[in-house]
Image (spheres, rainbow, N blue to C red):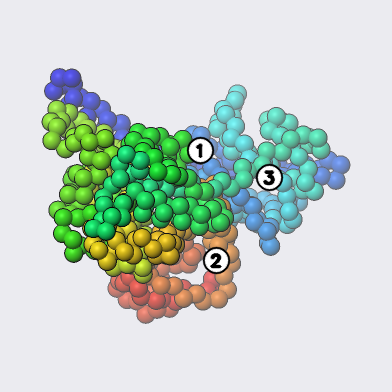
Amino acid sequence: MSRLCKILFIFIACFSVSSVALGSLPEIDALQVEQSRSNEIETTALTFVLTQPVKYRYFTLSNPNRLVVDINDAMLKADVAKVPLDNTVIKSIRAGQTGKQVRLVFDLKQKTDTQITLLAPKSNYRDRLLIVLTSKNAAITSKQIPEKKTLNTSKNSLLLKAAPERDIVVVIDPGHGGKDPGAVGSYGAREKEIVLGISQALYHLMKNEPGLKPVLTRSGDYFIGLRGRLQKARNAKADMFIAIHADAYKNRSARGASVYALSQRGASSEAARWLAQKENYSELGGVDLNGLEDSDKNLRSVLIDLSQTATIAESLDIGESLLSHLSHINSLHHETVEQARFVVLKSPDIPSVLVETGFISNPSEEHNLQNPAYREQIAKAILTGIKQYFVDNPPRGTLYAAQKDEQQAQLAHRTQELPYRIKKGDTLSLLADEYHISVEAIRKRNGIHNGDINVGQTIILPAIA
């Protein structure tokens, strides 16, 4: 590829990303409500008129009955508060815009069956999002909904329901194996056996956790190459990839746990660089690629930046959660997540971390790592870190996401004050959005005048009137 072609390619790639980022968002600019009754079955149909198609998800809540619809990458223009709801199954409609997400909450008079369909433009109609609510468990399909106002229902028609919550898939990768023993300790402990024991303990603990599905890249003493490890993660549709290691270091006094994420620009410390080179050599079957020339360095850098920036940011957040819990079991070799060019972490679409559970080259840590009880403690700490991350950042369509939505819906009706401990990344505006209160209310209740809050600080979130 000529130098000119490379420059044009980079320009087009960057321009495409910018165009997507700066493009106008779909608007929800009208809402129509229709009501019909047939054979004691009540049907309410709501049609949202759109400027472009949208992506959405929905779920229902009980006590009280509610329907919650989240529409991504859209702007709400319709005034839902002015929509007439007389003689419908809907008590009221509430709407909120958080960033690029629109959340619609329908307070219902009774339990209903729900169907939501995205209708393509037809005749004089634009894109529409159709929500059909039927009482007494009646069923209705989008094919039975005419374009005019009269709605027909049928007890025998098929109701399209929301997909059940899926499990979060965590791929656990015990390093080395088979012909590749990994590091060997002073008293003969082999890394491949140590990390398999920790990984198996983590696997069995996670199997008992609702909403989580563990997958092992290897369950015995055999070798899997880099391509095989990453392919297993992709085949499993992994939400997270965790490589488990217990490496040796040139300084035998080195001790403590570390967590690594991928670095785009190189290692973040001498230790990280040394370990990355060693692991890459092992994973690639003895072929060290670190010294090879890269004639397409600039182009590759741009493409990696485009595909991996978000994934690496997630990996760093995962690593922080793991470190906070590993610190209760072992000292930390690094207080923060390190970054290096570990080949096994280079999956552009799966957040990935490498956990160094300790240094097998340290005689004391070698002894601990050979103890099954100690290995289970490490596994429990890793599991707790994983759970905490997904509680805060649940993938959509999972049990963790449904639980967070339920919690937020309950918070929207909160009548009591709530103590809250500030964590990394919190701001007053984010807390106000999440807990459905104003920034000014938080400031006034806590005597905050300049808006500054500190990690670890406990504040009081005022009740919702």
The answer to whether one can see residue 408 in this image is yes
Tag shown at residue 411 = 2
Residue 252 quadrant: bottom left
Q: Secondary structure at mark 2?
A: helix
Position of residue 324 measured from the top left corner of the image (x, y, whole percent): 35, 65
For this view, does 118 lie left or right of residue 246?
right
Crowd band around label 2 with a 10 angstrom C-alpha radius: few (<14), some (14–19), many (20+): some
Real-space Cα separation, disc 1 to disc 2, in angstroms = 27 Å
Towards the viewer: 91 or 419? 419
Discs 1, 3 touching: Cβ within 8 Å: no
Give above or below for 313 relative to 287. below
Q: Which numbered disc flags the more N-terminal residue, 3 or 2?
A: 3
Front position among marks 1 and 3: 3
Instruction: Please tell me which of labels 1 and 2 falls first in the chain.
Output: 1
The dot on residue 114 is 3
Residue 27 position in % (x across, y down): 48, 41
Q: How many marks?
A: 3
Mark 3: amino acid: Thr
